[in-house]
Each structure stands twice: as structure tokens, then as C-alpha cells.
């Protein structure tokens, strides 16, 4: 039977791997810090102690050189007798046996010449009979003399050794604690991160399965996962709106094109009926029949033209949303707005509507002239269509207080209810009051696409109040150059 080890998912996360890296960095840092503390405290104390040992040894070596073994013995006796002995001594024979001093033998073989340094331990008096003697850390210098005897000078450094042991324990405990805390924190953070990633993964799986209503949780943590969740939610809102628009597009096209197609069919059937009832002996139709046929053909052509306009509007909207046919450059929107105001003024006069233009100066923006022209055409054309007879409209272009440029068309009339303003910006959306008017429901959708192509937006609000209602204001807002 084969055993299979399952590794927890959060162990494979980048967060946990980063935690391991930081734990390793912490361990290295702790080692470096401990080494630095040792160098600045323990090793410095040892160097200072060896310096003192070296000075004491040099004194005894000079005494030996001047007076021999007896002079050294007297010096050791005097140092032991004063009651303030700091160092430990041993004068050893050439074979290493003790001659005088505090030890029963050398802790290491004496060098052939010169001096050598040694670290060893010395036994202290037992606290009670039968108990093993405690050992204390010590360091020594051993030097061979001219007569082959050896002089040892030792120093008790138990306090320094104890400090070193405490530093090692503190460093090891601190490093171990830091690593454990880092690993525990990494596990907790990794589990939380893995849980968020699993939540987002399940969200994408549900979206792939077709549930576009799903949204990522609003964690409000301000971290990268919260930012990602907000971006995903914004994307899903946009995707759901586009998919819903695409789903509704077929119904909207069928609804809007059914009437003109029926009219074209009726006209063609009328033409066929007239041709069938025409006198067979008459090679050419009479004047009345010719007029009826011409009227039917004209109406069929007109209906066909309106259908083509709808399809062209769909194609143009798709091109703008895809970012095609765009040539961005510096454009003075004031000049463009003035030109379109002059062009549309006769259309408003023919419709019996008042019209005025209020245009600022120096409205420079990075824009595509063709797209902006199409947007202005749609806004002004809608104003001529949907402003009630005897009403008024206006074209306004200005720089707003936030620095952006606003081109707005306002008119009198019933306006659009506030709860319907978001819907009318979608494709093929036409309110019931506009169903009997010519159009495809793509005019404002194209304006929105142009605004988004220029990193701007469209605002709907009340316009010029009048007897028919609050009116409507449609503003295209884009950044200034």
C-alpha cells in the first residue's frame, strides 16, 4: 500500500514561500548579530585578557632572565602573599613537573620556543565533600625559557564565559522564536491569502459556467486582493452589461426592424398586385398605376434606407468600441461645436424650435474629430427629433471647474425619468414615448462609446424646464489636452 503525502494548498502559495525566505533572512540576520555581539563583547574581553596575561608573562620572563628560577619563585610567592592575586601561575621543570605555583601541571605542552595561548578550565573548591568540583573557564600563556623551564600565567574568565553562554542562549532562543513566529505568521497569512485566492477562483469558475451575477467579496482590507476584487467586480459589471446588451440586441433589432420590413413587404406585395391586375393588352401601365407603383417603390426604398442606417450605426458603434478608425490629435472643440451649431440651426428652425449656442474658447482636447463629430451629430439630431413643437434647445461647450471639457445639448420637453437614465444609454434602448419616432436606439449608445474611447463619460440630467416637463441635458465630458 503506497502512502501519499498531501501538501496543504497554502504551503504552495507565493506568500508562504516569501515567509520562508524572510525566515531564512531572519536566521542569517540573527547569526550576524550574534557574531557581532560576540566580537564586540566576548572576543574583545578575551583580547583584553590576553593582553594583560602577556604583560604579566613578560615581567616574569624578565625576572627569570635576570635571576633565574629562584628569582621567579620569589616573585610568585610575593604575588600570592599580597592577598590580591589576580593571575594564576606555574613554574614547571623541563619535563613539565611543577616547581612552584597554583597548578599541579601544565594544561598543554609548552612550546619549543616563544609563547603559546591556551583556553582551559580550572577546578574550584567543592561546595560540599563528595560533590564533583565545578569547573571555571580560564585562559593562559605558556612560554619556554632559556633553561628549558616553562612559565604559565593564567586568568579566570568565568564571568566572560558566562556572558558568552547567555548571549548564545539568548541569540539561539531569539532566532528560534523569531523563526517560529515568522512561520506561524506566514501560515496564518498564507491561509488567509489562499482562502481569498480560492474565493476568486470559484468566482471565475462560476462566471465561466455562465453565472454573470456573481461578485467578489468586498474585503475592504486595502491590500492587493481587495484591489483585485474591485477590479474583477468592475469587469464583471461591464461584462454582464455587454452580455445583456448582446442578448437584447437581437430582440431589439427584430422589434425595430419588424415594422419597416413589414412595410417593405407590403409595398412589394402592392406592386405585385398592381402588376397582376394591370390590363394584359396594355404594354405600359397607365398614369394612375405608374404613380401608385412609384409611390410604393419610393416608400420601400425609404424603409430600406432606414434599415441600412440601423445596420451602419451598429457597425460604427462596434468599430468605436473596438478602438478602430481612431486618429487622436489636438482638436479645438470650440471650433467644432461652432461649426455644428451653424450646420444644425436651419434644422431647428424648420422644426419650429428655438436654438442657441453658448460656446467657450480654447477648448483643446486630444480627440478623434470624426468620432466627436458623430457624437455631436447624434446629440443635436436627437434634440430636433424629441423636443416638442414650440420648444427650444441649446448647445453648450465649456471648461468645467475640474478642468475637463463639457459639450452638452439641452432641450425642453418631458425629459427622461431619473430611474430610466442609465437604461437609455444602453444599445437599442428606446423609451415607449420614442417608439413611434424614427431611430434605432443607438444614438446615445454611440455617444457613450465615443466618450469612453476618449477616457470620458456621459451625464444625463434635467435640461430646460417648460410646460411639457423638466427637459433633458446630455453632456459629453472628456479630459482637456
Image: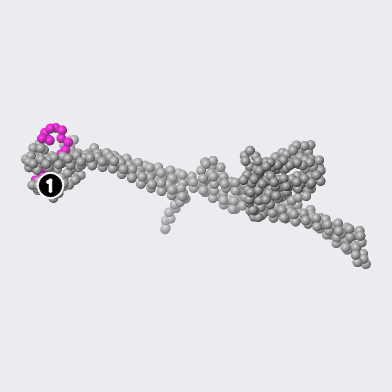
What residue is drawn where x is 7% and y is 39%?
71
Which of the 4 quarters of the picture holds residue 97?
Answer: top left
Label 1's element?
strand
Image quadrant occupied by the N terminus: bottom left
Image quadrant occupied by the C terminus: top right
Check residue 87 for magenta coloring. Answer: yes
Q: How is the image coloured?
A: one colour
What residue is drawn where x is 7% and y is 41%?
67
Image coords of residue 171 (percent x, y): 32, 42
Query: Label 1: few (<14), some or many (≥20) within 10 Å?
Result: many
**Magenta-colored span:** 78-94
What residue is drawn where x is 78% and y is 50%?
438
Which of the 4 quarters of the picture holds residue 418?
Answer: top right
Which of the 4 quarters of the picture holds residue 471?
Answer: top right
What residue is drawn where x is 77% and y is 40%?
392
Image coords of residue 194 (percent x, y): 49, 47
Image coords of residue 453 (percent x, y): 64, 49
In the picture, measured across the screen, residue 55 lies left or right of residue 461, that is: left
Out of 389 and 248, give the one closest to the viewer: 389
In the picture, measured across the screen, residue 208 lies left or right of residue 394, that is: left
As displayed, is residue 66 above or below residue 254?
Answer: above
Residue 320 in view, yes or no: yes
User: What is the number of callouts on the image?
Assistant: 1
As displayed, is residue 294 above or below residue 61?
Answer: below
Residue 133 in view, yes or no: no
Out of 351 and 427, give the one closest to the viewer: 351
Check residue 462 for magenta coloring. Answer: no
The residue carrying mark 1 is: 144
Residue at the top extreme, as displayed? 83
In the picture, measured across the screen, residue 451 lies left or right of residue 76, that is: right
Amino acid at each position: 500500500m503506497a502512502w501519499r503525502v498531501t501538501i496543504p494548498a497554502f504551503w504552495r502559495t507565493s506568500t508562504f514561500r516569501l515567509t520562508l525566505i524572510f525566515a531564512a533572512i531572519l536566521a542569517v540576520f540573527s547569526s550576524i548579530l550574534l557574531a557581532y555581539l560576540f566580537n564586540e563583547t566576548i572576543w574583545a574581553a578575551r583580547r583584553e585578557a590576553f593582553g594583560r596575561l602577556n604583560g604579566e608573562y613578560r615581567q616574569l620572563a624578565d625576572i627569570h632572565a635576570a635571576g633565574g628560577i629562584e628569582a621567579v619563585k620569589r616573585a610568585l610567592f610575593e604575588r600570592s602573599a599580597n592577598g590580591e592575586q589576580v593571575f594564576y601561575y606555574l613554574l614547571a621543570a623541563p619535563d613539565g613537573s611543577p616547581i612552584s605555583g597554583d597548578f599541579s601541571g601544565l594544561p598543554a605542552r609548552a612550546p619549543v620556543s616563544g609563547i603559546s595561548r591556551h583556553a582551559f578550565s580550572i577546578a574550584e573548591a567543592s561546595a560540599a565533600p563528595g560533590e564533583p568540583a565545578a569547573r571555571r573557564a580560564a585562559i593562559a600563556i605558556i612560554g619556554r625559557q632559556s633553561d628549558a623551564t616553562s612559565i604559565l600565567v593564567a586568568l579566570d574568565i568565568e564571568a566572560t564565559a558566562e556572558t558568552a553562554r547567555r548571549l548564545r542562549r539568548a541569540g539561539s532562543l531569539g532566532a528560534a522564536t523569531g523563526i517560529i513566529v515568522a512561520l506561524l505568521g506566514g501560515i496564518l497569512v498564507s491561509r488567509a491569502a489562499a482562502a481569498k485566492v480560492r474565493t476568486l477562483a470559484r468566482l471565475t469558475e462560476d462566471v465561466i459556467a455562465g453565472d454573470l451575477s456573481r461578485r467578489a467579496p468586498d474585503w475592504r482590507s486595502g491590500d492587493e486582493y481587495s484591489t483585485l476584487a474591485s477590479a474583477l467586480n468592475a469587469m464583471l459589471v461591464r461584462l454582464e452589461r455587454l452580455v445583456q446588451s448582446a442578448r437584447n440586441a437581437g430582440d431589439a433589432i427584430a422589434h425595430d426592424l419588424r415594422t419597416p420590413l413589414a412595410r417593405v413587404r407590403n409595398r412589394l406585395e402592392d406592386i405585385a398586385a398592381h402588376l397582376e391586375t394591370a390590363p394584359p393588352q396594355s404594354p405600359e401601365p397607365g398614369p394612375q398605376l405608374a404613380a401608385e407603383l412609384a409611390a410604393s417603390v419610393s416608400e420601400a426604398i425609404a424603409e430600406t434606407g432606414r434599415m441600412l442606417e440601423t445596420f451602419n450605426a451598429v457597425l460604427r458603434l462596434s468599430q468605436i468600441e473596438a478602438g478602430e478608425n481612431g486618429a487622436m490629435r489636438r482638436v479645438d472643440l470650440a471650433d467644432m461645436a461652432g461649426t455644428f451649431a451653424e450646420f444644425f440651426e436651419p434644422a431647428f428652425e424648420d422644426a419650429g424650435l428655438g436654438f442657441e449656442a453658448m460656446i467657450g474658447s480654447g477648448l483643446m482636447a486630444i480627440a478623434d474629430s470624426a468620432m466627436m463629430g458623430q457624437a455631436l451629430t447624434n446629440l443635436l439630431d436627437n434634440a430636433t427629433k424629441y423636443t416638442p413643437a414650440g420648444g427650444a434647445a441649446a448647445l453648450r461647450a465649456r471648461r468645467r471647474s475640474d478642468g475637463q471639457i463639457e459639450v452638452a445639448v439641452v432641450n425642453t420637453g418631458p425629459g427622461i425619468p431619473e430611474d430610466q437614465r442609465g437604461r437609455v444609454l444602453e444599445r437599442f434602448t428606446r423609451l415607449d414615448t420614442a417608439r413611434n419616432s424614427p431611430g434605432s436606439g443607438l444614438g446615445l449608445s454611440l455617444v457613450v462609446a465615443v466618450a469612453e474611447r476618449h477616457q470620458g463619460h456621459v451625464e444625463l440630467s434635467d435640461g430646460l424646464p417648460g410646460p411639457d416637463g423638466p427637459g433633458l441635458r446630455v453632456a459629453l465630458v472628456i479630459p482637456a489636452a
